[in-house]
């Protein structure tokens, strides 16, 4: 469970990326609406939940953090945990990946993840092997 300090630090990083998106003056309602619109409905939160994130009372669940990182175009690790010992206070946009970039829109990726999580253990293992083999193929 995150400490009060970790929650407050997450809130500060969230407010920083909101400032970059010009959402900081509009507050939690603007954040909730922006997330729903940008994620094509994959993230639907109440203004009260967004308020808790912005005030450091709670941190979103991991799947929501993943979508946040995609939508705000920031590094997931930075968003969740902050800069490393020598890391930047605010990360640059992610560097291009060495393998093929995914073309799945965030809302669809969220649906795929939900469907994957509903599989039994054996089927999940099979999908993981398939993905591993497909992503290790040369271009």
Image (spheres, rainbow, N blue to C red):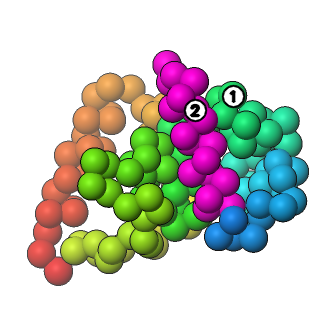
- 115 inside magenta stretch: no
Q: Residue furthest bottom?
A: 139
Instruction: Tell me which residue sits at (68%, 61%) in the image.
Output: 18
Image mark for residue 57: 1
The answer to whether marks 2 and 1 mark residues whose Cβ atoms lie closer than 8 Å is yes
Q: Residue at (43%, 41%) from the top-left corner?
A: 81
Q: Is residue 59 visible?
A: no
Q: Which quadrant is the C terminus positioned in?
A: bottom left
Going from N to C along the chain, the mark reached first, 2 or 1, is: 2
Q: Nearer the viewer, residue 41 or 1?
A: 1
* Residue 25 rendering spot, x and y as whole percentages: 84, 61
Residue nearer the viewer, 20 or 101:
20
Q: Is residue 47 visible?
A: yes
Magenta residues (range)? 1-18
Q: 10 Å neighbourhood of mark 1: few (<14), some, or many (≥20)? A: some
Dominant SS type (magenta): helix
- What label sits on residue 7 in the rendered view? 2
Q: Position of residue 23 (x, y in %)?
A: 77, 64
Choose top left, top right, bottom left or bottom right for residue 55: top right
- The image position of residue 126, as x and y in percent, is 25, 40
């Amino acid at each position: 469970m995150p400490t009060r300090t970790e929650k407050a630090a997450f809130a500060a990083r969230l407010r920083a990326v909101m400032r970059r998106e010009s959402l900081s003056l509009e507050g939690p309602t603007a954040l909730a609406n922006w997330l729903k619109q940008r994620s094509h409905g994959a993230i639907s939160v109440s203004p009260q939940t967004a308020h808790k994130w912005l005030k450091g009372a709670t941190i979103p669940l991991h799947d929501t953090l993943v979508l946040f990182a995609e939508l705000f175009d920031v590094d997931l690790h930075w968003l969740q945990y902050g800069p490393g010992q020598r890391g930047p206070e605010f990360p640059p946009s992610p560097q291009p990946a060495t393998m093929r970039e995914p073309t799945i829109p965030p809302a669809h990726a969220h649906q795929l993840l939900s469907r994957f999580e509903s599989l039994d253990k054996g089927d999940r293992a099979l999908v993981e092997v398939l993905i591993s083999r497909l992503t290790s193929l040369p271009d």
